[in-house]
C-alpha cells in the first residue's frame, strides 16, 4: 500500500479542504493512465480536449475532469488552469465517486 507523505505537515494539509465538481470522467487506456500518473506535467491530448471544463470559480470550487482507466481503482482529479498538463491534481478512490 502506498500514500503521499507530507514533510512536517500542519493540520490543514492532512484534511481535504478544497471543494470540487467533476465535470467529466475521462476514461483512458491503462498504459496511458500509468504514463500519466508517472508524468502528470507532460502535455496530454485528453486534457487539451477538455480544457474548457476545468477552472476554479469565484467561490474557490475546482471544476475538474476525473482521469481514470477501467483497470484502476482510483482516478486523478485534474484542473489544468488553461494548460495542457495537470497543473492541479488530487487522488480520488473510485469508492468515493460511486458512493
Image: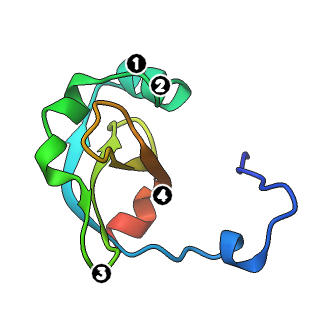
Q: Whole-percent x and y of residue 53?
A: 15, 52
Q: In this view, does 69 lie to the left or right of 72?
A: left
Residue displayed at 51% across by 24% down = 39
Query: In terms of depth relative to the viewer, which is nearer, 31 or 90?
Result: 90
Tell me if mark 4 has few (under 14), some (14-19) or many (20+) residues whose alpha carbon lies within 10 angstroms of its own: few
Q: In which image quadrant can residue 42 be found?
A: top left
Residue displayed at 38% across by 75% down = 19
Please name the residue that numbered disc 1 is placed on. Answer: 31
Please name the residue that numbered disc 3 is placed on. Answer: 59
Q: Which of marks 4 and 1 is nearer the N terminus?
A: 1
Query: In terms of depth relative to the viewer, which is nearer, 95 or 6?
Result: 6
Residue displayed at 45% across by 73% down = 18
- The residue tagged with tag 4: helix, strand or loop? strand
Marks counted in the figure total 4
Please name the residue that numbered disc 4 is placed on. Answer: 93
- The residue tagged with tag 3: helix, strand or loop? loop
Marks 2 and 4 sit apart, C-alpha to C-alpha, by 16 Å
Marks 1 and 2 sit apart, C-alpha to C-alpha, by 5 Å
Please name the residue that numbered disc 2 is placed on. Answer: 34
Q: Is there CB contact under 8 Å for labels 3 and 4? A: no
Between marks 1 and 3 in the image, the one whose residue lies nearer the viewer = 3
- The residue tagged with tag 1: helix, strand or loop? helix
Q: Whole-percent x and y of residue 79?
A: 33, 50
Q: Which of marks 2 and 4 is nearer the N terminus?
A: 2
Marks 3 and 4 sit apart, C-alpha to C-alpha, by 25 Å
Q: Is residue 7 left or right of residue 24?
A: right
Q: In which quarter of the image is the C terminus?
A: bottom left
Amino acid at each position: 500500500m502506498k500514500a503521499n507523505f507530507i514533510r512536517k505537515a500542519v493540520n490543514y494539509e492532512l484534511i481535504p479542504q478544497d471543494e470540487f465538481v467533476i465535470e467529466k470522467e475521462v476514461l483512458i487506456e491503462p498504459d496511458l493512465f500509468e504514463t500519466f500518473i508517472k508524468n502528470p506535467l507532460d502535455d496530454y491530448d485528453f486534457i487539451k480536449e477538455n480544457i474548457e471544463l476545468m477552472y476554479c470559480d469565484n467561490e474557490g470550487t475546482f471544476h475538474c475532469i476525473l482521469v481514470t482507466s477501467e483497470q484502476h481503482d482510483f482516478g486523478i482529479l485534474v484542473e489544468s488552469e488553461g494548460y495542457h498538463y495537470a497543473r492541479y491534481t488530487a487522488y480520488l478512490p473510485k469508492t468515493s465517486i460511486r458512493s
